[in-house]
Image (tube, helix red, strand yellow):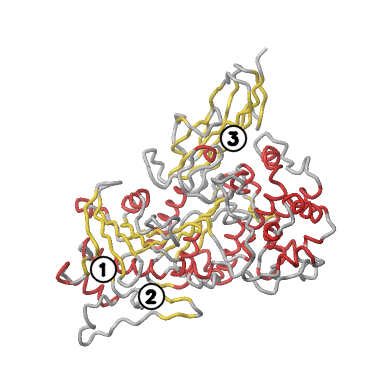
Amino acid sequence: MSINCTLARHGGIGILAASLLLGTGLGSAPPGMAAAPECVAVAGAMQITADCIDPQFTKPVLDSETDETAPIAHHRIRAHFEGTNIEFNVYFHAKQDLGTWEGRFFQYTYPTAFTPEEDTSQADDRAVGFALSSGGYAVQAGNKSLALGYRHTAAAAKFAETLAAKYYGSNRKISGYLYGPSGGSYQTIGATENSTGVWQGFVPMVQGVPQPTSYNFVGRSAAELILGNRADQISNALLPGGSGNPYTGLDPAEQAMLREVHALGIPWKGWEFPDYLLGRSEQYANGLDSSIPLWFDPTYADDFWNTPGYLGTENSPLGVRVRAELAQMGDTVDNRWNIANRFYYRYQTPPASEGWVGLQQFLKADGTALYPQRPVKDPGFSGFVSGNTAFDGSINGKVIVVDNLYDTDALPQHADWYRQRVQASLGQAATDNYRIYYNDHADHQNAPVTGERAKHLVNWYGMAEQALRDVAAWAENGVKPPASTNYQISDAQVVVPDNAAARRGIQPTVDLTVQGKESTSVKVGQTINLRAKAQVPPGAGAVVKAEWDLDGDGVYTDAPLVRVGNVVMLQTNAAFDKPGTYLVALRVSSERTGDPTATFALAQNLDRVQIVVTPGG
């Protein structure tokens, strides 16, 4: 049974303060005290302050309170906003641990559930454990609609603060930190550009931005059509010990497609897992090969196949290839849309001044578009996910972006696109309020890496947790976090130095060799020597753990460290009892204080070498 948030239920000034702040229906403000103002919208984006009332969330209702033991002991409050589908949970320290609260909270956000049964208002065990072990309580608000942006998260955060003041028995200032991946990064940026005083810091993860035509997904779909049967060949060329030339053996149409898709900014590193990059299996399908006509541009497919200037009529190797694909698939309306949709990004080209480096390949030297342009722009989805945020870089509070170099969903270059807007908005003050950390061997997904993914990817969530701790220390105590990752943009690709000291950021680097090289060939039973150097960027901690994957199956075993340090040398010998090609890996973890027992905020990286094992004599 729901329990209305009333003084009879909880008593005390904490709930009275909540009623004045959020309009819980407990009556008007006392005589002499002004009522809280209503939040207002500017250019379609609701401006949230610490003391305004969002008219959509005026009546919080407490549903239950329980003391729970997993993942660690804590006190949990379940609640919702009356008249909405917004539910939220607050996770406080257990009574015996109240003294470990340091006056802060951490709040995860994501725009919607993946399934109707999923409850995104419930924080997972890791989010709860991290928050409580980092001196904060956890807040999480879920919803069934993409259209709310950051507003419901702000309402939940503000009401949770009134509960926290009552629960912890403290009048101290409470500092809040909002973080979210992918679609949650849209909400996080929406909050930092359109709120003041609710949160003091923000960590957008695998940052999405409102790019034209969703060209990262569409370009991958085009690559699947033209390069799908070459995927393993391209992948092998780019793996450790490979030729390094992914164009070898490709015909002119395939070479043109490969150049185009990576000039869009889709990482070369994505070819290490081509099934995900191309969405060519049911498990990793990205739904990009859609035969559905574009509702906002219903004449596009006809123009693609019939009008000069479009690829369907183009006298080029790639044009000839797409016509051949249509003939092979069958010349139907569905198949015409299927192929045409994959190349839509060519026909929505913004001017160079907007900064879309990946689309500038479709501009002539004079800045005009190389191909015909569609009169109706793709509306995208960033507006309603972010709460109609401008994405102009006008951040309020401290921001640390965590982005990944293997990410083919939210392209690494897009985080730099937003960094430039922050720089333009804040000028010199940007260095006092903004950081960006790029992680190698990490992609878009935040679940623990297992199976095929564990062979070449690390769990990057520890880096995000360290960024949250850093942004809290920055906002509360002025402790500057480590410098942003040092990188360059080359052909729309984000390129970082190999050396940790030069790369900076917070991720360790690993340099693994076999017999002093990147690859070697040995016979069955022959012993080989593996050596590695692991380093941590300045001020980012020490290597505290190392693990070997000697047979390349993604399963790691501990490698004892002689010492914990910011530079660590490791070596081992190995032999193989079966012929084959093995990609042997070493994975290391670093921790800011050098604590080898730490559970959260571990920064990981790995390196691999190729060992070709031939039959013995």
Numbered tag placed on residue 61 in the rendering: 1
Amino acid carrying mark 2 in the image: Thr
The CA distance from mark 3 to mark 1 is: 53 Å
Find the distance from the CA under tag 2 to the CA under tag 3: 49 Å
Residue at image mark 2: 49
Secondary structure at numbered mark 1: strand
Res. 84 image quadrant: bottom left
In the rendered image, the vertical position of residue 256 relative to residue 375, given as above or below? above
Q: Name the residue under label 3.
A: 608
Q: Are marks 3 and 1 in contact (CB under 8 Å)?
A: no
Q: How far apart are marks 2 and 1 (CA)?
A: 21 Å
Disc nearest the viewer among 3 and 1: 1
Q: Which amino acid does label 1 sit on?
A: Val
On the image, the x and y values in percent for residue 12 come to 16, 70
Tell me how many marks there are: 3
User: As drawn, which residue projects farthest toward the right?
Assistant: 315
> On the picture, is 204 further left or further right than 69?
right
SS at badge 2? strand
Task: Give the mark nearest the N terminus, 3 or 1.
Answer: 1
Residue drawn at x 24%, y 78% is: 25
Quadrant position of the C terminus in the picture: top right
Give residue 608's quadrant in the image: top right
Q: Residues within 10 Å of mark 3 (few under 14, many from 20)?
A: many
Residue 465's x, y, as percent?
42, 51
